């Protein structure tokens, strides 16, 4: 049973400051996804058509609804495929990089000017000199609360 | 060597979890939802089990003693529906929710809010099925297959049942889409498909099957509904329809559905047996291919459920050949499991016992399935207790025992506490003995000619029916012991180790503490 | 001491043989077939079961060997192999070969089974909720037609006559009219149904065929020995599904011929003179019989039905209302309920049963439905 552990974690902190990286997906393989959803859609259509030909056309609308649901799921995943958000403290500056639908934006704030502000229900943003960027968008609520706590500590208390 | 390689998840121990009932209602956390699925399925297991007790009580002796025939028919119907759609399927979806993100190194499911919705659709559907008992005229005594035209002439309970099936179907589809996207999209770096634990593979294939066949079921029950109320004649011969068309549609869904239940069970067993053999799974790749072949074949054999319904002899021959073919990949799986144990270093804790019970009895059920696949023999045995015995070997000793194996196996990881091994073993042996007392004798009843779904029988069947009923009461009571074991584990079990089973080597054992933290992998582990 | 031990053994052996004798009363296998085809099927089942048993013992022999010899508690160390192509190919191919060996005899049997051509006698079996109707269509006895319903007294079923039940060897397997067929002749059974799907099944004759409303299916058998063979409806068909048995009486040809002639005489005698005028009393009397055959299972002898499921006729608005509405309802049935169309009843029976319901229990319309009125609304 002596075996080398086959799994190992990425060290979470590669330098003593706080860095944070979240992306939406980690293992998207477009060809695989296409194969899976393409074949499912074809199978569904073939089944529905075959049943329609022997008189049971009521399978078609349900197959259609399902293909639509599958399509919506794929679309949402593809839309968010390359998205990421990274946060890093370098000295007294905080650098934020956000990529949404292939569009990357960089923000470079001074720690003593940047403030955490609420933006929308349950969401938080960093703001400095009129520029605002939402953070923690790929966390769930508790993850976001932790991030807020972490940032608040580093940006100075009582700013929000 | 066996020390757990856990991440620093200390920062997850926070106090900001929503509390009270709303925590569960609103939860989008895969572990919360998995827990709810499992509890829900256990509750349904008790409801369906109570119905089985009524059935066996009525069949304890010849004559009508306890219930009226129409109520008896309603019990057989809803026992089947509730066990299939309410107990077994949600149980394995519960496993999927708990385990897939942990096993592939993901933080959660791909669509957490949809996950919440797909669970919360279940309780209303279950309530509809139960409410159907109180509809005017009582529950629809049409069998879980809901064959037309009997279902066309049933009372309003039928409409409630159809509505419940629609809701259950929606829930299954959302769950399946979630599982597929999670597995395809959320794997940790380096976790290729062929490195995934077999449990994830079996669910990937199951989810594919479910998505492919659910519209067929939805279509079938919708056509029943329109035949009932909107003057269509899909299944009404007087209007140009064909009652047998319903059976084709239903079983085109129904046969893959059998594998929807069995395949995740294969997955659980494929995790448990290597762990207690302290040896890697034999033939991982052939397991994956065998599972996929079973899934593909399951689309091609539906009419073996209806050999007596009337079809050309060529069709019967085709379905017979296709059906016996399923024995090949199924055999490969059984051989692989036995080879996994071969020259291992075996121990027999409760999960392993249930997995072995599964292996032994599921194979027996597979063999009676082979007997039934041979058309001339099936025509003798169709709609008899032989069939009832066959599918209970596959569903109870197969799927249910595998679910028990899985629960005992992962309970330490889920709760951070160990179950009581002695009680667990009692649960296994009681279940094993009573299960066989209940169902083995039903083979003889079927061979001798007792039809299924009858509330009363001729005197020649009296002895075996009494034995079967005694077994059933014992089996039912033994499951209360299971409830006690689980509650005792949660409230006062001993602390479990992070890697409770030394032979377990998937990510949830090697990389996560027990109990598993609220978020599995905030940062993905790297799989080499 | 030794003597005591010996006695113990004798007692144990006696117990063992007693239990085997007791087991002999338990039926463990298919019923003894009474057709050639049935014997083939019986053997086919035996062969498959034995093959399965051998494989089962083989596979689990390995498993139990591992369970006992490769356990950690006896100090066995785990090997780490996890594949072996040769073995894997072997255990894919060998089952394949066994399955082909099984499929070959099964194919032959199935083709014989489905060849219902050139029958000596053709009988149509129609499933009704919940009895069978038989029409001798072709061959000796052509034209004979009767219904066949459960004849076990209700008291034995509901438990008011338990002694009677225990003394009844054919409890639930007896009918008022047997299907009579000649021995050694090929009998083709055409199955159909009037309402929902039923299945015509007689285990000893190795026939099971669904009876599908609106369609005709067929099956056949050639009985080897005279005798009475009993079966049941095998497809769930509603409330009384467990109570519609099938009894086939196989007779020697001479006896069969005699039976046919008595039946045909009975038919001639019972043939109602179409010009006959029925008095209300006669109609009501005849109607009581029709009611007992067709209506009582749902609407009950008291006319009270089953609350929630089957409406009461006693005090019913339809029964006490205009005659035409009631005739139409019974003729055409009520869509979406268990009330089927009763077009298959003759005009006289229809008129009679309606007269009966209109003048029984607390219903006192005092009128009678004439056969001509029923005919007019068909």
Image: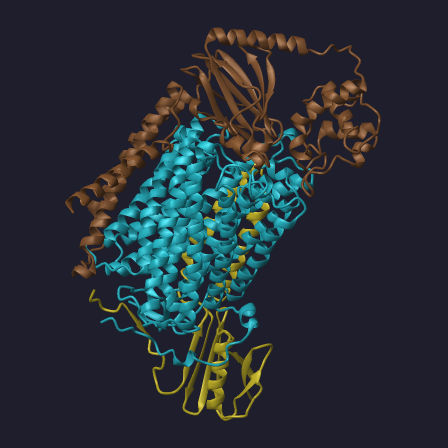
Chain colours: A yellow, B cyan, C brown
Residue visible at 46% across and 53% down in the picture:
B88
Question: Is residue B186 something that shows in the picture?
Answer: no
Is B34 located above or below residue B449 in the figure? below
Foreground residue among B173 and B72: B72
Place of residue C32 in the rendered image (x, y in percent of width and height, measured from the top left): 38, 24
- In the image shown, does C292 or A93 lie closer to the viewer? C292
**Is there any visible trace of residue C154 in the rendered image?**
yes
Depicted B20 relative to depicted B486: above or below:
below
Pinpoint residue C87: horizontal percent, then vertical percent.
21, 45
Above or below, comparing residue B315 to residue C283 in the picture: below
In-front residue for pair A28/B272: B272
Q: Quadrant of residue C31?
A: top left
Q: Position of residue C268 (x, y in %)?
A: 65, 8
Q: Residue at x 35, y 58 (%)?
A: B426
Residue at x-position 69% and y-position 32%: C301
- How many marks the image carries: the answer is 0
Q: Quadrant of the image for the N terminus of chain B?
A: bottom left
Picture quarter with the C terminus of chain B: bottom left
């Amino acid at each position: 049973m002596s075996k080398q552990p086959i799994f190992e974690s990425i060290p979470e902190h590669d330098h003593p400051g706080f860095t944070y990286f979240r992306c939406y997906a980690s293992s998207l393989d477009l060809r695989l996804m296409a194969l899976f959803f393409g074949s499912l859609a074809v199978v569904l259509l073939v089944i529905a058509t075959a049943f329609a030909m022997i008189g049971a056309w009521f399978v078609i609308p349900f197959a259609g609804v399902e293909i639509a649901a599958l399509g919506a799921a794929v679309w949402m995943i593809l839309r968010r495929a390359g998205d990421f958000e990274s946060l890093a403290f370098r000295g007294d500056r905080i650098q934020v990089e956000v990529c949404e639908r292939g569009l990357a934006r960089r923000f470079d704030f001074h720690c003593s000017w940047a403030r955490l502000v609420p933006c929308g229900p349950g969401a938080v943003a960093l703001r400095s000199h009129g520029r605002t960027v939402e953070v923690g968008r790929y966390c769930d609520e508790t993850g976001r609360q932790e991030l807020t706590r972490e940032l608040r500590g580093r940006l100075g208390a009582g700013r929000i | 060597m066996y020390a757990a390689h856990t991440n620093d998840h200390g920062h997850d121990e926070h106090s900001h979890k929503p509390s009270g009932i709303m925590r569960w209602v609103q939860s989008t956390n895969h572990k919360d939802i998995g827990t709810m699925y499992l509890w829900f399925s256990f509750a349904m297991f008790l409801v369906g089990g109570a119905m089985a007790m009524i059935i066996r009580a009525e069949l304890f002796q010849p004559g009508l003693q306890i219930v009226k025939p129409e109520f008896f028919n309603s019990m057989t119907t809803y026992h089947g529906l509730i066990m299939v759609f309410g107990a077994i399927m949600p149980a394995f979806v519960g496993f999927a929710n708990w385990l897939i993100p942990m096993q592939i190194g993901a933080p959660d499911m791909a669509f957490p809010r949809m996950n919440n919705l797909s669970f919360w659709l279940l309780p209303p559907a279950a309530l509809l099925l139960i409410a159907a008992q109180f509809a005017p005229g009582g529950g629809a005594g049409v069998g879980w297959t809901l064959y037309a035209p009997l279902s066309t002439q049933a009372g309003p309970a039928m409409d409630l049942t159809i509505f419940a099936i629609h809701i259950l179907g929606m829930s299954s589809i959302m769950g399946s889409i979630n599982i597929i996207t999670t597995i395809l999209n959320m794997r940790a770096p380096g976790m290729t498909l062929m490195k995934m634990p077999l449990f994830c593979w079996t669910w990937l294939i199951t989810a594919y099957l479910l998505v492919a066949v659910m519209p067929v079921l939805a279509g079938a029950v919708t056509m029943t509904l329109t035949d009932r109320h909107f003057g269509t004649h899909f299944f009404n011969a007087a209007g140009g329809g064909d009652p047998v068309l319903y059976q084709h549609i239903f079983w085109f869904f129904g046969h893959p559905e059998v594998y929807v239940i069995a395949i995740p069970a294969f997955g659980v067993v494929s995790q448990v047996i290597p762990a207690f053999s302290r040896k890697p799974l034999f033939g991982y790749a052939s397991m994956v291919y065998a599972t996929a072949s079973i899934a593909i074949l399951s689309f091609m054999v539906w009419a073996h459920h209806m050999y007596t319904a009337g079809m050309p002899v060529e069709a019967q021959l085709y379905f017979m050949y296709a059906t016996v073919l399923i024995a090949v990949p199924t055999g490969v799986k059984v051989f692989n499991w036995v080879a996994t144990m071969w020259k291992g270093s075996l121990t027999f804790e409760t999960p392993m016992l249930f997995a072995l019970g599964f292996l032994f009895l599921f194979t027996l059920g597979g063999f009676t399935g082979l007997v039934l696949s041979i058309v001339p023999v099936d025509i003798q045995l169709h709609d008899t207790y032989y069939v009832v015995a066959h599918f209970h070997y596959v569903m109870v000793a197969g799927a249910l025992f595998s679910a028990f194996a899985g629960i005992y196996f992962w309970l330490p990881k889920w709760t951070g506490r160990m179950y009581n091994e002695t009680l667990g073993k009692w649960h296994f042996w009681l279940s094993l003995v009573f299960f066989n007392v209940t169902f083995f004798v039903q083979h003889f009843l079927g061979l001798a000619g007792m039809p299924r779904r009858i509330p009363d029988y001729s005197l020649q069947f009296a002895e075996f029916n009494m034995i079967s009923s005694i077994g059933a009461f014992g089996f039912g009571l033994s499951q209360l012991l299971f409830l006690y074991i689980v509650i005792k584990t949660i409230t006062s079990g001993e602390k479990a180790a992070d890697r409770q089973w030394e032979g377990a080597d998937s990510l949830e054992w090697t990389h996560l503490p027990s109990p598993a933290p609220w978020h599995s992998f905030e940062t993905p582990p790297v799989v080499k | 001491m030794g003597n005591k031990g010996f006695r113990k053994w004798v007692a144990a052996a006696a117990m063992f043989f007693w239990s085997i004798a007791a087991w002999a009363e338990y039926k463990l296998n298919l019923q003894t077939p009474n057709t050639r085809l049935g014997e083939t099927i019986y053997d086919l089942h035996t062969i498959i079961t034995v093959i399965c048993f051998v494989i089962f013992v083989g596979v689990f022999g390995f498993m139990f060997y591992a369970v006992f010899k490769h356990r950690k508690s006896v100090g066995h160390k785990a090997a780490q192999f996890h594949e072996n192509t040769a073995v894997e190919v072997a255990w894919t191919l060998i089952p394949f070969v066994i399955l082909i060996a099984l499929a070959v005899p099964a194919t032959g049997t199935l083709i014989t089974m489905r060849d219902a051509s050139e029958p000596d006698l053709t009988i149509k079996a129609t499933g009704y909720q919940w009895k069978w109707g038989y029409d001798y269509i072709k061959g000796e006895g052509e034209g004979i037609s009767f219904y066949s319903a459960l004849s076990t007294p209700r008291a034995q079923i509901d438990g008011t006559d338990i002694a009677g039940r225990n003394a009844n060897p054919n409890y639930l397997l007896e009918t008022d009219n047997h299907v009579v067929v000649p021995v050694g002749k090929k009998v083709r059974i055409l199955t159909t149904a009037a309402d929902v799907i039923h299945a015509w099944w007689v285990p000893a004759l190795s026939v099971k065929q669904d009876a599908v409303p609106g369609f005709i299916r067929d099956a056949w058998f050639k009985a080897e020995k005279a005798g009475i063979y009993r079966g049941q409806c095998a497809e769930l068909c509603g409330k009384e599904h467990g109570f519609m048995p099938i009894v086939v009486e196989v007779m020697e040809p001479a006896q069969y011929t005699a039976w046919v002639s008595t039946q045909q005489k009975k038919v001639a005698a019972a043939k109602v003179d179409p010009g006959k005028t029925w008095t209300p009393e006669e109609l009501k009397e005849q109607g009581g019989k029709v009611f007992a055959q067709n209506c009582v299972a749902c609407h009950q002898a008291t006319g009270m039905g089953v609350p929630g499921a089957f409406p009461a006729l006693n005090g019913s608005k339809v029964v006490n209302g205009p005659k035409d509405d009631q005739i139409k309802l019974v003729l055409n049935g009520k869509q979406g309920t268990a009330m089927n169309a009763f077009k298959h009843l003759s005009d006289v029976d229809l008129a009679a049963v309606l007269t009966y319901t209109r003048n029984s229990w607390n219903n006192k319309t005092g009128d009678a439905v004439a056969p001509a009125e029923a005919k007019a609304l068909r």
